[in-house]
Amino acid sequence: MRPKKNFERRRFPRISVDLPLEYQSQDRSKPHGALVLNLSEAGLQLFSLQDLPVGAVLNITVLFPKGFRLANFKVSAEIVWKNVLYDVDFNGYRYGLRFIKLLKEDQWELQRLLHSYSGLENRVEVKFMETP
């Protein structure tokens, strides 16, 4: 019996991040907040408290902190998978999304950002200062 090879099926590498985002479904319901867990040129993984169906298309704004050249970017993305997360204190959902519409200038900046972090082992954490 041959050992199984562990290989990455993704076409684009992902970086782990902790970035806030805002999303709205195509029916223009009220916006909701979520957290980006990882990001690539083709999509992202997010955590949300909202239950959304696989196949739903969302209009997303990822909010980058000041200092990033890519301040915010807007994208339309389709939910391609969903995991339900149960815990004693909360319930939530983890989603995999595939980008379906992204402006060329945002795509270029996203590629540059991902390339700059592709060699880093550590998670990119965003820390916000508290206002006095």
Image (cartoon, grey):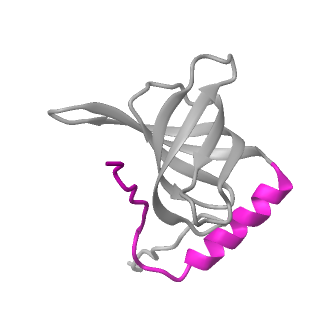
Q: Nearest the camera: 81 or 32?
A: 32
Side of 119 relative to 18 (left or right): right
Residue at the extreme front of the image, as rendered: 132
Is the residue 32 above or below the residue 12 in the image? above
Side of 47 relative to 62 (left or right): left
Is the residue 21 above or below the residue 29 in the image? below
Q: Residue 118 magenta-drawn?
A: yes
Region of the chain picked out in magenta, as a range:
103-132
Q: Residue 121 magenta-drawn?
A: yes
Residue 70 % position (x, y): 68, 60
Residue under the point 68% across and 16% down = 27
Instruction: Decide if residue 56 is in sight here.
Output: no
Instruction: Decide if residue 68 is in sight here.
Output: yes
Q: Nearest the camera: 12 or 117?
A: 117
Side of 99 relative to 68 (left or right): right
Residue 42 % position (x, y): 68, 56
Q: Quadrant of residue 77?
A: top right
Is the residue 109 above or below the residue 85 in the image? below
Q: Nearest the camera: 72 or 131?
A: 131
Residue under the point 67% across and 66% down = 69
Residue at the extreme right of the image, as rendered: 104
Side of 39 relative to 101 (left or right): left
Residue 126 % position (x, y): 43, 60
Residue under the point 56% across and 58% down = 39
Residue 24 % position (x, y): 61, 27
